[in-house]
């Protein structure tokens, strides 16, 4: 297909998008009927359209739907959806809710981050040949992949967790609030560590590392002390453009894309810039005056995100996992679950939570979902993990998220709403 015309490639992209949107919608509805977040159905749809399921059928259907010369364009659309999604994640990251949250949030956050991180680091050290797939082989270079896997194991999917709490009527309970606060702390820790790992991995020399760190500092300071005040003035009531949805939409989308480009130019992934810009946007100004602007951005990202799941699914190959890889997968899953459950439940008990509350916190924080796929995509792009380990980690992300609902139903079967009494 190397000699196809631009019109033929465009047709393939359009057909692929049509299939992606339709299949993702069906899978999302099926997931919701199973009391799972709809995004989990979309993730499964992306994997199903790849070589792990559709590609096993006769006729090379995956290659026909997503030919090689069309995939770069699908990748651009996937990255656009991902960047807009990360803007929303950053904008919803309300760090003020952590003020005065108390020792329980701090203890549970650190415990449920540190223990999975340590277990992931240990697994990466022990299972390095599977992790690298023949990539970085020098012993001195094993530190960066090990740090990456530890970070990937310690993440909690903040957006998916919020949906789970909403679906199960736990959003207003103290346990739900504590879990969201802990997930917020962990997201900040995980993205900070991930940024440091990627910087260290991509910087070829001390000089380039210093330039990258310097660029990040300039970007962070500029967003905090220049962009944020300017956005506050632009969106403030009384301005000529106050209340203008098109103007605000143009400014926020353009700012997101520029920051995503900036971190890409620095050698990092685009998600870091989008996330940072989302955090820089004044929450009150947008939420009070132009709530529909962020809603439109979120709706656009949700429309494009299934493309990201398909692009991710094209790298997932269940058929390449043999007995040894399955054994590695079992170890990864056990470490991931034990790290989150023990890392959250033990500190929660030590800070006054009842046994059932503590276990509920561990179950909630074990959900990884979409955020995990984003981090794994960064690691795969940077060569920090190979294809086999990527597939194993995707399976872990799916299992830990899907098991959240059934485990909550089992643990809270006889528990009325809002029973938590621990002080936070």
Image (cartoon, rainbow, N blue to C red):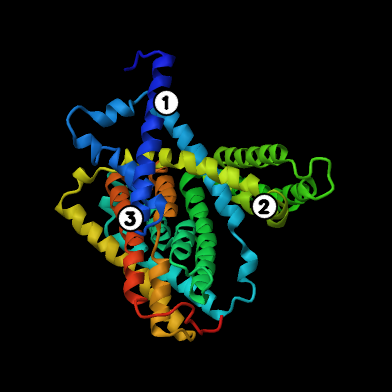
Q: Residue at x 35, y 39 (%)?
A: 23
Which comes sooner in the sequence, label 3 or label 2?
2
Instruction: Give the number of the disc on residue 14.
Output: 1
Q: Quadrant of the N terminus?
A: top left
Whole-number angstrom distance, CA of label 1 to CA of label 2: 35 Å
392 horizontally vs 176: left or right = left
Whole-number angstrom distance, CA of label 1 to CA of label 3: 28 Å
Q: Residues within 10 Å of mark 3 (few under 14, many from 20)?
A: some
Which comes sooner in the sequence, label 1 or label 3?
1
Marks 2 and 3: in contact by CB < 8 Å? no
Q: How many marks?
A: 3
For residue 355, above or below residue 182: below
For residue 363, above or below residue 129: below
Whole-number angstrom distance, CA of label 3 to CA of label 2: 31 Å
Q: Residues within 10 Å of mark 2 (few under 14, many from 20)?
A: many
Q: Secondary structure at mark 1?
A: helix
x and y percentages locating residue 131 in the rendered image: 30, 51
Q: Quadrant of the C terminus?
A: bottom right
Instruction: Give the number of the disc on residue 398.
Output: 3
Instruction: Give the number of the disc on residue 227.
Output: none
Instruction: Give the number of the disc on residue 280.
Output: 2
Which comes sooner in the sequence, label 1 or label 2?
1
Marks 3 and 1: in contact by CB < 8 Å? no
Q: Residue at x 46, y 37 (%)?
A: 78
Q: Quadrant of residue 273?
A: top right
For the question of whether residue 409 can be seen, the reply is yes
Q: Nearer the viewer, residue 96 or 265?
A: 96
Q: Comparing marks 3 and 2, which lies closer to the viewer? A: 3
Q: Nearer the viewer, residue 145 or 153?
A: 153
Q: Comparing marks 1 and 2, which lies closer to the viewer? A: 1
């Amino acid at each position: 297909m190397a000699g196809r015309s631009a019109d033929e490639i465009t047709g393939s992209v359009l057909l692929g998008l049509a299939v992606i949107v339709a299949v993702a919608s069906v899978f999302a509805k099926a997931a919701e009927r199973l009391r799972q977040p709809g995004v989990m159905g979309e993730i499964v749809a992306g994997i199903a359209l790849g070589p792990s399921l559709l590609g096993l059928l006769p006729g090379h259907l995956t290659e026909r739907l997503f030919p090689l010369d069309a995939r770069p364009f699908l990748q651009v659309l996937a990255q656009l959806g991902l960047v807009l999604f990360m803007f929303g994640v950053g904008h919803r990251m309300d760090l003020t809710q952590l003020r005065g949250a108390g020792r329980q949030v701090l203890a549970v956050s650190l415990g449920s981050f540190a223990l999975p991180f340590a277990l992931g680091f240990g697994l990466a050290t022990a299972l390095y040949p599977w992790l690298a797939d023949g990539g970085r082989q020098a012993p001195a270079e094993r530190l960066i992949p090990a740090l990456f896997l530890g970070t990937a194991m310690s993440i909690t999917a903040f957006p998916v967790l919020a949906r789970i709490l909403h679906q199960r009527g736990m959003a207003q309970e103290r346990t739900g609030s504590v879990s969201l606060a802990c997930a917020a702390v962990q997201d900040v820790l995980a993205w900070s560590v991930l940024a440091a790992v990627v910087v260290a991995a991509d910087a070829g020399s001390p000089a380039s590392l210093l330039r990258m760190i310097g660029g990040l500092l300039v970007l962070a300071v500029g967003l905090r002390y220049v962009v944020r005040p300017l956005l506050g003035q632009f969106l403030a009531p009384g301005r000529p453009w106050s209340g203008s949805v098109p103007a605000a939409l143009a400014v926020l989308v353009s700012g997101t894309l520029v920051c995503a480009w900036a971190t890409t130019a620095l050698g990092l992934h685009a998600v870091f810039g989008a996330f940072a810009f989302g955090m820089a946007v004044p929450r009150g100004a947008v939420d009070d005056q132009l709530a529909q602007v962020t809603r439109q951005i979120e709706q656009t990202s949700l429309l494009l995100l299934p493309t990201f799941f398909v692009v991710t699914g094209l790298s997932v190959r269940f058929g390449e996992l043999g007995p040894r890889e399955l054994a590695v997968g079992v170890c990864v899953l056990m470490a991931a679950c034990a790290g989150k459950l023990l890392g959250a439940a033990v500190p929660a008990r030590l800070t006054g939570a009842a046994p059932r509350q503590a276990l509920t916190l561990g179950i909630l924080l074990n959900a990884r979902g979409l955020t995990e796929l984003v981090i794994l995509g960064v690691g795969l792009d940077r060569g920090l993990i190979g294809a086999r380990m990527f597939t194993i980690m995707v399976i872990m992300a799916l299992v830990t998220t899907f098991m959240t609902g059934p485990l909550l139903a089992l643990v809270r079967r006889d528990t009325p709403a809002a029973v938590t009494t621990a002080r936070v």
